[in-house]
Amino acid sequence: MVSPTLTLGSFGVAVLVGLTGMGGGALLTPMLMLAFGVPPLAAVSSDLVASAVTRPIGAFVHLRRGTVHLRLAGWLSAGSVPSAFAGGLIGWWAGPDREIQAVTERATGAVLVLAAIGIVARTALSSREGSMAARGGGGSSVTAPAPDFFVRKFPTVMIGIIVGLAVGITSTGSGTLVLAALAALYPALPAGRLVGTDLAQAVPMIFAAALAHAIAGDVHLAVTAPLLLGGVPGIIVGSLLAPRVPGGLLRASLSVLILVSGLSLIGLPRPRPCW
C-alpha cells in the first residue's frame, strides 16, 4: 500500500528541488531516515531510483537552453559513473548487517554537512555574479556561448570519482558538491552553466548508482512508489514556480536544515519506522 504521508513529503521535497535547483538527495534521504524511520540502505536506494526518473527532466531543460558544457560533463561522467556503481555495491559486498547500515547513516550525515557548506558557497557565487552583472562588471549570461577554456581532465575526473562514490553510498552530493568543486576549478564558467553541466553528468551517474542498488536488492517498492508519485508532479510544479520565488534566500534557509539533518544522522538515533 502506498503511503499518502510519504507521497506528500516527496511532493514537498520535489517542489523545493524545482524551486532551488538543489539535489533532492540532500533533502529526501534524511527525511526518509529521520522522519519515516526508513533503514539507511533502503532510503539511499529508493531516493536514487526516484532521482533516476526525475533528474532527466531538469537535464533536458538545460540541454534545450544550451547551458550544458558537454565536454566537461563527459569528463566528469568518466569518473562519476564507475565510482557511483561501485559505491552502490558496497553494501552488498559488506553484507546486510547492522554495521553497514550504521556506516551508511553516518556517511550520509557527513556528506550532508559538506552539502550544506556547498550550498552556502553556491549562493555566494550566484550573489557575486548578480552583483557583477548589475554593475556591468563582466557577469556572464547563462545563455551566452560557453567560454572557450581548457578542460583540466585529471582534476575533473577526480571530482567525478569522489562525488560518484559519495552518491553511490549516500545518494547525496550530486548537486552541491559538484557545483562547489567546479566553481573552484572553473571560476570563468557562469553559475547557470555549472548547474546545467552538473545535471547532465548526474543522469548517467545516478542511473549507475540506482542499478547497483537494484542488483544488491536494496530497493523497496513500498518506499520508491510514493517517492515517484509525489516527486514527478512536485518537480514540475517547483520548476514552474521557480522564476517567481527568491531561490537564493530559500537555498540559504534549507542549508541550515540540511546541516541539522546531517549532524543528527551522525550522532542521534532514528525514530521508529512509520511507513
Image (cartoon, rainbow, N blue to C red):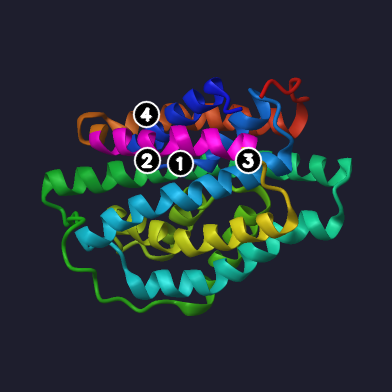
Q: Residue at x 34, y 50 (%)?
A: 58
* Kind of residue at disc 4: Leu
Identify whether 99 is placed above or below 33.
below
- The residue range painted magenta reads 222-240
Measured in 3D between alpha carbons, the distance from the residue under mark 2 to the one under mark 1, in whole angstroms, is 6 Å
Inspect the image, locate mark 2, and give the three-letter code of the amino acid beneath it.
Thr
Amino acid on which the number 1 mark rests in the picture: Ile
Q: Are discs 3 and 4 less than 8 Å apart at CB? A: no
Residue 221 — which label? Answer: 3
Residue 119 - label: 1
Label 3 and label 4: CA atoms lie apart by: 31 Å
Q: Is residue 213 visible?
A: yes
Q: Quadrant of the N terminus?
A: top right
Instruction: Evaluate whether residue 111 shows in this view.
Output: no
Q: CA distance from mark 3 to mark 2?
A: 35 Å
* Helix, strand or loop for disc 4: helix
Image position of 76 with respect to 96: above or below: below
Q: Amino acid at mark 3?
A: Leu
